[in-house]
Every structure is written in structure tokens, then in C-alpha cells.
Image: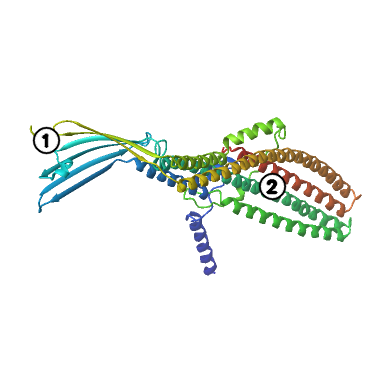
Amino acid sequence: MRTPLIRQVLRLLLSMLLMLWPVHGQAEEVGSPLLLPEVMESIRRAYPLIVAALADRRAAEGELQAARGGFDPMLRAKGDATPFGNYRIGRFDLLIEQPTPLWGASAFAGYRVSVGDFPDYDGKLVTNQYGEIRAGIAVPLLRNGPIDRRRATLRRAEASVQVADSSLGEARLAALRTGGSRYIDWVGAGLRRQVAQSLFDLAKVRDEGLQVRVQRGDIPAIERIDNQRALWQRQGLQVAAQRSVEQAALELSLFIRDELGNPVLVRDARLPPQLPPPEGTNFGDPAQVQADQKIAQEQRPELRKLAQQRRQLEIERDLAKNQLWPSADLSASVSQDFGPPGYPRDKTVLDLSLSLDIPTLNRAARGRLAQAEAALQRFVALQRLVVDRINLEVADVHSQLAQAIRRVELAERELDLAQQVERAERAKFELGDSTLLNVNLREQATFDAALRRIDALVELHRAKIIRQAVLGNEG
């Protein structure tokens, strides 16, 4: 007799320990229903494609920094010595050069000093005892004046940052559009499961009443058998609806992520109880369509991206045109030697120089110009096609919204009438004036009407999300 008592006491102690012991991996406390703004915020924060687009932008900023490096000052130092020979000499030359974006001009300053006896033909290398300080500027007058490769690279890199920003906007809009649609699909799957559950509950409750009526002999046993058949059939619909909810939740988990960026599988308890009804607006109105098309052309990142890419091609074309010009470079420098009195270089020296380089056939530059102009013409045609496609998308989403609203209205009317007929048929069955077959048919009609209403609402809300993306709204 002691053994069962000891076992009961041990089981009680074990159950108490399990209640007090923390359970790892337990589902967190059920929160409020998951709403669309929370999904959108998670997408903006941690969706991988957006994170990748941010990395591309940082790469573009690195490219811009590298292009700005073309204007970094350059410090050069050189020393020469001839310790043995007819002329024992030594020289040291220090030069700093600063390129500028002003008409391709570059400024320079330097210091040099020489020691020893130089031959007469190297007289320009001689400096006073304390050396020579010089400064000057070089300006290209024609070729490389309005634009050169250094400035073209910088301008292209600046445009690349804008392209990366637009690509980030494209990735964000695409993710918000897809993630928002997945959220609506998930909510719709939950509503369909509710309808399937209600249909199953009707058959289950009826089966209890039919059992009593069959026992009393009010109806034949075949009626209950038919209801049990419907019960199993509706349970199959329930299982299919549950599978749809789980599949939609898995698809949605790609867009809802935790602080570490890992996908989060949303629990059924966070399913919203309904989708909002349609709001009246002038979707499909020609004036509204044109207004939205104008908004889309101002806000869509694709068009901003194309504008910057076109700018890059125009920079290449302008550079190719400039390289057809002759080269005419003007330079001016001032130098002053320092040392004790009597050294040969006491006066300030001003040097001016003009060099000309006139190309003959110049086929390389002409070929590059032809390539740049052809690429630009091709791009302008593609840019026009994108504008036309965006206008088409705006008109199409207006049509989709207008028809979705109309479809919701029709589905709600159909559902209301189906419910009325179902209630009347059920009342007739209770009075013995109808058959269970007719009741099942009426309930199935109500079930189908409820699904069509959910499908219409899902299409409507998906179209609203698509409209925001088509207009370029990231909110």
C-alpha cells in the first residue's frame, strides 16, 4: 500500500517543480494583433535586400571618395649627386602640386637648392646658397579645360551615389510591396480558416441534435449519417485552411525579423479579426489618374536613377567631345633665389609657357564620341519606355482598385442574401419541411459567398499596397 502512496507524492512534487522551473524556448506572451505598419517597419529595418542596397550605397560613397582623391595634393622630392667626375655637384628639389576643379588648372610650389660647379650648359640648375623658392599655375585653355578625366570621374562618382540612393529606394519599395502583400495573404488565410471553422461547427452542433431526433424516431438514421459525411468533409476543409495559414505565415516570416535579422514565424494569436472595409474614393477618375501619374513621375526611384545614369552618359559624351579639341596649355611661374650678396641669381624671375598640341585624324577621340552618343540615344529611348510603363501601372492600379471596391460590395450583398436563405432553410428543416441535403447546400452557398467576400477584400487591400509602391510612397 505504501508504494502507490509514495508514487503519488513523487508525482505531485515533480509537477510542482515543473510549474516552478523556467521552460526554455517557450512561446512568448500573446500580444496585440499584428498590423501592417509593424510589418513595414520590420521590412525597412532588417530585410536583407534593403541591407544589401545599403552596402551598395556605402560602396558608391567609397567610389566617390576615391574620385575626390584625384584632387589630393602631390608631394614630390628628388635628390641628385655626382661625387666623382669633372663636375662634382649635388641637387635637391621639393615640389608640391595641387590639382583644382577650376577649368582643370593646377597650382604648384617648390624649393630647390644646388651645390658644386655646374657646366655652362646646365646653368639653369644653379641656385643661390640658400636655394630657390618657386610657385606657379598651369591652365589648359582648350582640351581638358571645360572637362577632363579627373573631373569626369568625380562627377560620375557623385552621380553613382545618387544612383545607389535610388537603387535603395527601389529595393525598399519592392520589399514593402511584396511584404505587404504577404501580410494581406496571411490575414486572408486566417479569415478563410475562420469561415471553415464556422462551417464545421454548424455540422458538429447539428449532429448532436440529430442524434436525439434519430433516437426519438423523428427522422431516419440516414439523415445523421449524411450530416456526419458533411462533418468529415468540412473537417477536410478546415485542414486545408490551416495549411494555407501556415504557408502564408512562413512566407510572411521572410519580412518580419528580430533584432538579429532572423525570420520570425508569427503566431496565429496575432491574426487580426478582420480586414477593414473599403473606403469610398474616386479611383478610376481620369483627373485622379493623371494626378497620380504626375506624383509617380516625381517620386519613383527608377526615374531618379535613370536621370543620374543619363547624367553619367552625358558626362562621357562631353568628355569625348572635349578630347577632339587641340591642346593649348598655358603655364606661369615665379621664382626667387636667396643667398648672400653677389650670388648670380638675385632678381625675381617670371616664366611663361604656352604649348600647342594639334591632332590630325583624331580617330580615337571620334570613335569614343560616337560610342558615347549612341549609348546616350539608346538610354533616352529606354527612359521614355520606363515613363510610359509607370503611367500604365498607375492607370492599371486605379482600375484594379475601382473594380475591387465594386467586387467587395457585390460579395457583401451576395453573402447577406445567402445567410438569409440559409437561416430560412434551417428553420424549415427544424419544422420538418426540408431535408438536410438542402440545408447543406444553403450552408455551402454561404461558405462560398463568404470566401468570395474575403478574396475581394484581400484583392482590395493588396491593390492599396501596390498603389503606394506605384506612386513611390515608402510610408
For this rendering, which residue is in front, 8 or 192? 192
Q: In the image, 405: left or right of 133?
A: right
Looking at numbered disc 2 in the image, what kind of residue is underneath it?
Answer: Leu
* Residue 423 x %, y %: 83, 44
Q: Judge left or right: residue 402 versus residue 380.
A: right
Quadrant of the drawing holding the N terminus:
bottom right
Distance between mark 1 and mark 2 Cα atoms = 100 Å
Look at the picture and state if 374 lies above or below 299.
Answer: below
The kind of residue tagged 1 is Pro
**Left or right of residue 461, residue 157 in this image:** left
Q: Position of residue 443 (x, y in %)?
A: 81, 50
Q: Can you tell which of label 1 and label 2 is closer to the viewer?
A: 1
| Front one among 432 and 5 | 432
Looking at the image, can residue 103 be seen?
yes
Mark 1, secondary structure of its residue: loop
Q: Earlier in the sequence, mark 1 or mark 2?
A: 2
**Which residue is depicted at the point 73% across and 44% down?**
456
Label 1 crowding class (10 Å Cα cut-off): few <14, some 14-19, many 20+? Answer: few
Residue 39 position, x and y percent, is 57, 44
Residue located beneath label 1 in the image: 344
Q: Residue at x 75, y 44 (%)?
A: 453
Q: Which residue is mark 2?
A: 191
Examine the rendering and report whether any part of residue 34 can be seen. no
Left or right position of 37 against 153? right
Q: Secondary structure at mark 2?
A: helix
Q: Is residue 6 above or below residue 371?
A: below
Please tell me how crowded label 2 is: few (under 14), some (14-19), or many (20+) other residues with Cα within 10 Å.
many
Residue 349, compared with residue 113, is above or below; it is above
Residue 34 pos. (x, y %): 59, 44
**Which picture quadrant has residue 403?**
top right
